[in-house]
Image: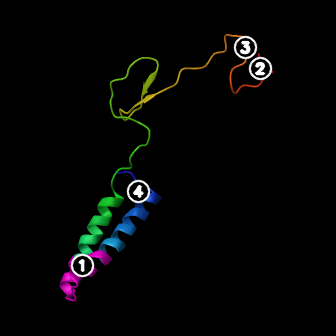
Amino acid sequence: MPRPTAAQLAYGSATVVFSTVALLLLTRTTDGIAVAAIGIASLALGLLVAMRPPLRRGTRRTGTATGPAASAAPDGITTRVPAPRSHTGGEARVGEHSLRR
């Protein structure tokens, strides 16, 4: 099992604190057993948030792209690789230096 990142631990800890405070304020309980149950439920929720696998940004889980423009990562996520640029003309393009001809 992979280790959780620092961000996952921070989100899990914040979830435990805020859910405990929210549940204690909403239920207005003073009984020791109810407070313990709220604490256990908040810890379980924080553990669930902390151990959730991180989402990958900028990738799609399609698996339908093939060919030289796509590469498949070992975990099955397909990513697009841009084609290399080539300068064929002698004219300067927008954003390029005038001495590059």
Question: Decide: marks 3, 4 in contact (CB < 8 A)?
Answer: no
Q: Check disc 1 and give the amino acid type.
A: Leu
Residue indicated by mark 2: 100
Quarter of the rendering containing residue 48: bottom left
Q: Earlier in the sequence, mark 1 or mark 3?
A: 1
**Label 3 CA crowd tier, 10 Å (few <14, some 14–19, many 20+):** few
**Label 4 CA crowd tier, 10 Å (few <14, some 14–19, many 20+):** some
Taking the image as shown, residue 30 lies to the left or right of residue 95, namely left
Residue indicated by mark 3: 91
SS under mark 2: loop
Q: How far apart, in angstroms, are the residues tagged by discs 1 and 3?
A: 70 Å
Question: Decide: marks 2, 4 in contact (CB < 8 A)?
Answer: no
Give the number of the mark in front: 1 or 3. Answer: 3
Question: Decide: marks 1, 3 in contact (CB < 8 A)?
Answer: no
Q: Check disc 2 and give the amino acid type.
A: Arg
SS under mark 4: loop
* Numbered circle sitting on residue 56: none
Q: How far apart, in angstroms, are the residues tagged by discs 3 and 4?
A: 52 Å
**Label 1 CA crowd tier, 10 Å (few <14, some 14–19, many 20+):** few
Quarter of the rendering containing residue 8: bottom left
Quarter of the rendering containing residue 94: top right
**Nearest the eye: 42 or 23:** 23
Query: Residue, x 32% and y 30% (percent of image)?
Result: 62
* Numbered circle sitting on residue 4: 4
Query: Residue, x 36% and y 73% (percent of image)?
Result: 17
Q: Is residue 43 magenta?
A: no
Q: Earlier in the sequence, mark 3 or mark 4?
A: 4
Highlighted range, magenta? 21-37
Residue indicated by mark 1: 26
